[in-house]
Amino acid sequence: MKPLVVALLLAFANFVHAQEALDIFDRAVKQFDQRQKALRSWQYYQTLVARQYDDTGSLVGKGWWRALVRPGAEPPIEYVSGSTEGELTLFNKPAEAKSSKKSSGSSQRTIAERELHEESSRPESVAEAVTKYHLRDRYHWQRLPDARTSGEIAYVLRFTPKKNQTQTDGREARFFSLLAGKLWISKRDHSVLKAEAALQAPMPLLWIIARITHLQFVWEVIPNRANPLLRRSHGYSSLTIDLPFKTVRQKHRLTVDKYERRPGKK
């Protein structure tokens, strides 16, 4: 009888901890959407740097793009400058990007342009995305011991995908069904201070002949005691895509900085 009692107590404890983790996650989602609304009076710059490597680890191509982001605007992102050098699969050169703007149906669109074109069909808030992609139910949630990051004490949550998921129609749904990672959420205001995640299995792309075999990223904010709303942030990712007769290996760095008031906003 004792082993059964112990098993029931452990199951109950795991349920309570999972519910605590979900409650913290829900508050973080709500806080994130409130922050995005508060940022509609501001605009900021983000810079993406991409590097590509061959099988020996040698650098074969690089590029950078700078964009102006206006939360809540249409479109929300305006690319202002950029350049590429050498071999950089998945990204077009600036000259190609300019010519593709003349024809919205062109197959030569850059990834950035395609993402903007699809923006209207995406959820308008994080809360809507959580519902649309079933993120609360898609994972096993666990609360880990609190930790300090970005100058604050944070809740630490771990999420791992449940097996045999049925709601995996569409690229984003397939992506989330294979993702596992951790979130660091401020105990002060429930803002997300840090996130890290990685794919747990290869993910097929839109083309049957290509798949992502590795994807890992880390994102974190930089403390700003003067105005927590205007915190800078940076993220790093590594990506491997298998193509016929070729493997693409890239590393990316995304930096968010330089906040300023939007014209006509108070």
Image (cartoon, rainbow, N blue to C red):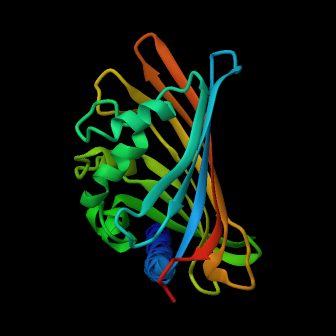
Report the residue at 32% width, 20% height from top. Answer: 209
In the shown orientation, is residue 222 left or right of residue 156? Answer: right
Eyeballing the image, is 162 above or below 23? above
Is residue 213 among what the camera can see?
no
Q: Which residue is drawn at 52% across and 77% down?
A: 262
| Residue drawn 48% across the image and 14% down it | 246
Q: Up-down: is 244 above or below 108?
A: above
**Rendering quarter of residue 75:** bottom left
Q: In this view, does 30 lie to the left or right of 207?
A: right
Compared with residue 50, is residue 8 higher up or lower down, i.e. above or below? Answer: below
Q: Horizontal and vertical percent for residue 1?
A: 44, 71
| 163 vs 101, nearest the viewer | 101
Residue extending farthest to the bottom is 266
**Residue 104 picture quarter:** top left
Frontmost residue, 263 versus 105? 263
In terms of depth relative to the viewer, which is nearer, 210 or 4?
210
Q: Which residue lies furthest to the top in this view?
A: 245
What x and y, as percent, mark residue 101?
A: 34, 41
Q: Position of residue 114 (x, y in %)?
A: 34, 44
Q: Is residue 153 visible?
A: yes
